[in-house]
């Protein structure tokens, strides 16, 4: 959690919380205001542990809000492509739950927060039954290892096509990001082997790590993230394409895991400030879901120490408050 999120910033009056987003003109104005308000924030650092990500410019900044009614508001670089990274995790978990049943997926992967960084090995060792949760690397690689298919190619197709249905367009891999991470992801390979040793890997560990690395290298935009989020907000139906991607029954479970672990060890601070399930990625993306109402997508590469987009968090807190989205807000008297 970035220090700036701890500050008692005056955000302005909240919209009255109803079952819907405020009228579309009000949403458009607030998305504009959020962009202007945080454009000049210069804190955070662009990720460089995956060498190709270090090429990102610190000032790239896009925001999108997509409603469950199909309305979409883009501001700034909302259609600039970047790799989805960890934001693939909740969506792949949703697809795997849909294919296997949520009970089986939960038993195989776990759903409790680790309270530790996303690539923690210690978290595996400390957990009695060696399960994790699908929002951190270990649980995400285990989730990917559960993807149905007769071989690696089929399992990859299941994931790429499923994520594309969430976005409502055909998502493509960034070959450079994939090659860069594949050449440097020995830690994730080690995590997969460790899980294998504990009987918590459900296909070949090297194959699962490779497919996981591919899913992380899929290119998306802030616009895509908002639509993907709105699909979870809409009980699994993409509000733009109207296609059902997963059942409503899955969505509430996925949102629960995002709320507990979507921003890793800072998920508590996040929920306290924003009051919504979210998921960050190291390329600077951040998706947030307002159940029943819509999805927010932000893209801004500079990250805080936990690997969460600094501007992304600030924008989302602002929009959650001003759009009246916080799940824990009382109903008006
Ligand atoms: N937090 C992230 O976005 C991490 C994803 C990245 N592909 C990794 O495994 O390290």
Image (tube, grey):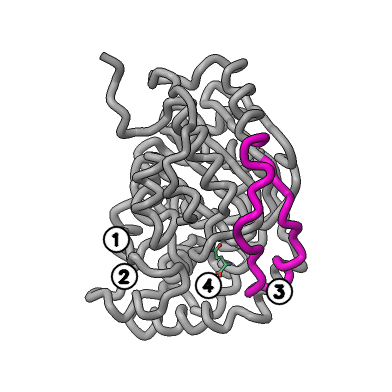
Quickly name the residue at label 4. Answer: 208
Is any part of residue 101 visible from this angle?
no
Quickly name the residue at label 1. Answer: 112
Magenta part mainly helix, strand or loop?
A: loop
Q: Earlier in the sequence, mark 2 or mark 4?
A: 2
| Towards the viewer: 180 or 264 | 264
Q: Is residue 44 magenta?
A: yes
Label 1, label 2: how far apart the Cα atoms are: 8 Å
Q: Which of labels 2 and 4 is toward the front?
A: 2
Which residue: 34% across, 53% down? 268
Q: Report the residue that reaches farthest toward the left.
A: 128
Please give the range of residues in magenta.
Answer: 35-62
Q: Dot 4: few (<14), some (14–19), or many (≥20) neighbours within 10 Å?
A: many
Q: Earlier in the sequence, mark 3 or mark 2?
A: 3
Question: Residue 70: image x %, image y %?
Answer: 59, 24
Question: Residue 59: image x %, image y %?
Answer: 73, 51
- The quarter of the picture where residue 217 lies is bottom right
Label 3, label 1: how far apart the Cα atoms are: 31 Å
Which residue: 49% across, 78% down? 204
Q: Specify whether 210 is left or right of 56.
A: left
- Quarter of the image where ligand 1 sits: bottom right
Where disc 3 sits, the SS reads: helix
Label 2, label 4: how far apart the Cα atoms are: 16 Å
Residue 267 lies, with reference to residue 8, above or below; the image says below
Q: Dot 2: few (<14), some (14–19), or many (≥20) neighbours within 10 Å?
A: many
Q: Evaluate if marks 2 and 4 touch, with contact meaning CB atoms under 8 Å apart.
A: no
Q: Which mark is residue 51?
A: 3
Q: Earlier in the sequence, mark 1 or mark 2?
A: 1
Question: Residue 176: image x %, image y %?
Answer: 77, 68
Quickly name the residue at label 2. Answer: 131
Is any part of residue 251 visible from this angle?
yes
């Amino acid at each position: 959690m970035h220090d700036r999120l701890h500050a008692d910033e005056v955000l302005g009056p909240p919209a009255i919380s109803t079952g819907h987003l405020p009228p579309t003109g009000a949403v458009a104005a607030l998305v504009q205001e959020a962009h202007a308000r945080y454009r000049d924030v210069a804190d955070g650092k662009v990720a460089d542990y995956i060498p190709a990500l270090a090429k990102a410019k610190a000032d790239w900044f896009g925001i999108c809000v997509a409603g469950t009614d199909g309305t979409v508001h883009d501001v700034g670089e909302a259609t600039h492509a970047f790799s989805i990274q960890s934001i693939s995790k909740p969506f792949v978990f949703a697809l795997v739950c849909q294919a296997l049943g949520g009970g089986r997926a939960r038993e195989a992967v776990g759903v409790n927060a680790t309270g530790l960084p996303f690539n923690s090995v210690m978290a595996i060792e400390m957990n009695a039954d060696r399960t994790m949760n699908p929002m951190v690397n270990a649980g995400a690689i285990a989730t990917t290892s559960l993807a149905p298919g007769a071989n690696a190619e089929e399992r990859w197709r299941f994931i790429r096509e499923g994520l594309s249905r969430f976005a409502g367009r055909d998502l493509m891999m960034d070959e450079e990001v994939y090659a860069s991470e594949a050449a440097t992801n020995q830690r994730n390979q080690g995590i997969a082997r460790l899980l294998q040793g504990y009987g918590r890997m459900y296909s070949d560990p090297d194959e699962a790590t490779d497919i996981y690395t591919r899913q992380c290298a899929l290119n998306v935009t802030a616009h895509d993230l908002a639509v993907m989020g709105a699909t979870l907000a809409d009980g699994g139906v993409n509000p733009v394409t109207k296609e059902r991607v997963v059942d409503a029954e899955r969505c509430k479970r996925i949102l629960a895991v995002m709320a507990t672990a979507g921003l890793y060890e800072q998920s508590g601070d996040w929920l306290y400030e924003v009051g919504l399930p979210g998921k960050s990625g190291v390329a600077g993306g951040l998706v947030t879901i307002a159940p029943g109402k819509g999805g927010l997508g932000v893209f801004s590469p500079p990250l805080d120490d936990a690997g969460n987009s600094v501007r992304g968090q600030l924008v989302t807190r602002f929009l959650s408050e001003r759009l009246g989205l916080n799940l824990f807000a009382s109903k008006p008297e």
